[in-house]
Amino acid sequence: KKYKQGMEKTRNSFSGKINDLIARYRKVDEDFFEELEEVLIAADVGINTVMELVDELKMEVKRQNIKDTNEIKDVISEKLVDIYYGDDDEEIEKLNIQKNDLSIILVVGVNGVGKTTSIGKLAYQLKQEGKSVMLAAGDTFRAGAIEQLDVWGERAGVDVIKQGAGSDPAAVIFDGIKAAKSRNADVLICDTAGRLQNKVNLMNELAKVKRVIEREVPEAPHEVLLVLDATTGQNALSQAKTFSEATDVSGIILTKLDGTAKGGIVLAIRNELQIPVKFAGLGEKIEDLQAFDAHAFVYGLFA
Ligand code: GDP
């Protein structure tokens, strides 16, 4: 329900435009497909994804002998979901959490995308599920980042392991792991600095942090979640490219989906980078984080 409420902007523009197309065209023809392409591109679905979708649609229209545009809506939803999952099963959206062992989640992303907020929301959500959660304040670079994480830790009711500003992020995360182990925590969520301006620094810092984590906990980090702001559209896509070159990103937290009509970016990220969206941010409050579900998302677009 929350999911539907948060997606109004995208849904209104998306389904509004597609319904309008269907009403105007009635018959499925070349011009219809051309306008459909424009609508999808305007929703930030991404050129490659749009091309793939339209090719698939054309084939399906031929196969099922669809003439009336009214019949094509369901086919569009089906194909979008198919393209989203590709050859993978639907488990790709699930967070990789260990059953009886410490799980470590590394969170990366540039400033302002909603990284701190998302960490707070995720900690709260996992805690609601009965897990004991701790945070490590590894963004020692941005002024105020540690204090801000502290505020979210308090809101979520979880402890934050920190050192002073400017300290070594890998050392903070090392402390976090030690504390999480000694307190038998289920999940440690590690914040990191997002210095995109300097890719070499970013890569080195993330590599160092990962080395520390791997040394302390085999198979960790269990997730590397990249936080992206849906309202930045194609910019989010290029951030995703840069971060996936710097480290192995296992999933996306897509924030501010409530604030954009361009929710199609979800499909572009998945299709062009093969990274699944695992959570969607749908507001500023602590409960406003939703486990992502492509079915609900796509069908929500057309509801
Ligand atoms: P950071 O610099 O990446 O840590 O970003 P913050 O967590 O400080 O968030 C930046 C701003 O985005 C804040 O005003 C948040 O309230 C807001 N924000 C974060 N996530 C969402 C979301 O899902 N929806 C909306 N509407 N605002 C969000």
Image (spheres, rainbow, N blue to C red):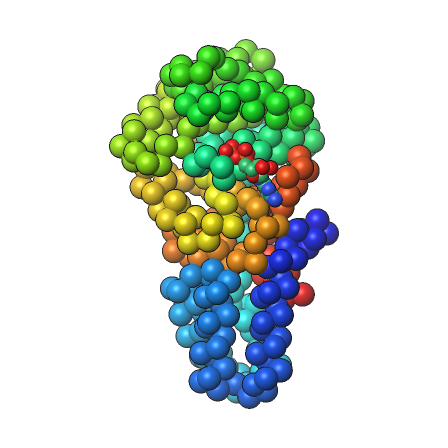
Most extreme residue toward the front, as rendered? Answer: 143
Where's residue 158, x and y in %? 63, 21
Most extreme residue toward the left, as rendered? Answer: 200
Q: Quadrant of residue 199?
A: top left
Q: What residue do we see at 42% from left, 28% from top?
A: 193
Which of 11/124 is in front? 11
Vertical comparison of 70 with 92: above or below: below
Asked if one can make out residue 188 in the rendered structure from this viewpoint, the answer is no
Q: Quadrant of residue 268?
A: bottom left
Q: What residue do we see at 58% from left, 20% from top?
A: 150
Quarter, ligand 1: top right
**The C terminus, quarter of image:** bottom right
Which of 278/237 is in front? 237
Asked if one can make out residue 127 in the rendered structure from this viewpoint, the answer is yes
Where's residue 116, x and y in %? 54, 31
Q: What residue do we see at 40% from left, 16% from top?
A: 166
Vertical comparison of 151 with 37: above or below: above
- From the viewer's perspective, tell me whether residue 67 is left or right of residue 275: right
- Total number of numbered labels? 0
Where's residue 125, x and y in %? 65, 34
Q: What residue do we see at 48% from left, 55% from top?
A: 265
- From the viewer's perspective, tell me whether residue 207 is left or right of residue 152: left
Which of 221/144 is in front? 144
Most extreme residue toward the right, as rendered? Answer: 1
